[in-house]
Amino acid sequence: MGHIHWNQSDYDKAMEYYERQKIICKELNDDNRIYTVNYQIALVYWNQGYAQKALDCFETSLKHYEKHGQKINIAIVCGNMLIAYYYLGNYEKTIECYNRQLSICKEIGNKRGASIAVGNIAQVYSEQGDFKKAMECCLERLAISEEIGDKIGISISCFNIVNIFIKYKEPENPLAYYNRAIQISSDLNARYYLCEQLYYKANLLYEISKTDKATLLIAKLLKWRRKSAEKV
C-alpha cells in the first residue's frame, strides 16, 4: 500500500503505511526488510522536500548494506545520497558518493548503473559551471549506453549533451544530438522525453537564429500534444 500511495504522490499516506510495515518487520526480526522500508521512507522524505531527513535514512540503510556486503544496494543508496548531499551544498561528499557508486558498479559489472552514476555527476558538474567535465561525463554515459544498447540512456545522454552545449559551446553539431535523442524517444513512444526534447530543440533553433524552423517545431509540438490529450 505504501508504494501505491507513493506513486500517487500521497506521501503522508505512504509514510503511514511504511511506518506500519517497519513495525511489523521489527516484530518479525526481518532486518533486511526493515532497511528496505527505511530506504523507501527516505524517498518519501526526499519528495516532501526534507533533504536532511532523507539523507539520515539513506545513511542508516547504507550502514546495514555495508555490514552485510550488499554491494548493489550500496551503489543504489550512494546514488541517492550524492543528490541529497549536492542539494545540501556538501560537494565533497557528493563527489565521494559518486566515486563509490561508480567504483562498485564497475566492480560488479553493472554497466547501466555506471552510466547512471556518470550521468548524475554530469548534472552536478553542470550546475557548478564546470561544463568541460560535465560534457566529458555526458559523452562517457553516451558511450556506455551505446555499448549496452540502452536506448533511453542514449536519448537522455544526447539531450544532456546539447543542454551543456548551449552553455559551453561544444560539440560542433548540437542539432545532430537532439535529432538522435528525438528519434529514439519517438521510436520508444517515450512521450515525456519527446515533449521535453522537442521543446528544447525549438529553443536551440531560436538561439542559433533559425526562427522559422523553431516556430514550425513549436507548432508541431502543440499540435502533437493536443492530439495526445484528446486520446486520454
Image (spheres, rainbow, N blue to C red):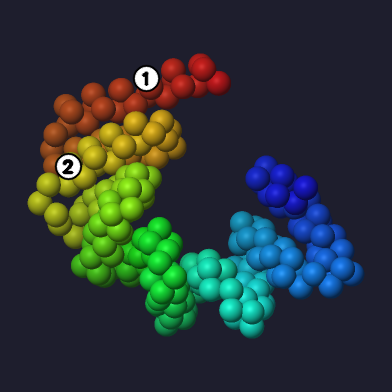
Q: Nearer the viewer, residue 119 or 10?
A: 119
Q: Secondary structure at mark 2?
A: helix
Q: Residues within 10 Å of mark 2 (few under 14, many from 20)?
A: few
Q: Quadrant of residue 116?
A: bottom left
Residue at mark 2: 176
**Above or below for 91 versus 210:** below
Task: Name which residue lies at 38% across and 45% down.
Answer: 152
The earlier-in-sequence mark between 2 and 1 is: 2
The image shows residue 77 at horizontal and vertical percentages of: 56, 69
Task: Name which residue lies at 20% across and 54% down.
Answer: 165
Check the picture and name the quadrant holding the C terminus.
top right
The image shows residue 128 at horizontal and vertical percentages of: 33, 70
Residue at mark 1: 223
The image shows residue 47 at horizontal and vertical percentages of: 61, 57
**Above or below for 106 versus 224:** below
User: As drawn, is 28 to the left or to the right of 215?
Assistant: right
Q: Nearer the viewer, residue 109 or 153?
A: 109
Q: Residue most toward the left?
A: 172
Q: Amino acid at mark 1?
A: Lys
The image shows residue 162 at horizontal and vertical percentages of: 24, 50
Q: Residue 123, can we see it?
A: no
Q: Quadrant of residue 17?
A: bottom right
Task: Name which residue lies at 39% across and 34% down.
Answer: 188
Q: Secondary structure at mark 1?
A: helix
**Above or below for 167 versus 133:** above
Task: Name which residue lies at 44% across and 74% down.
Answer: 104
User: As drawn, is 70 to the left or to the right of 162?
Assistant: right
Alpha-carbon distance for marks 2 and 1? 24 Å
User: As drawn, is 87 to the left or to the right of 168?
Assistant: right
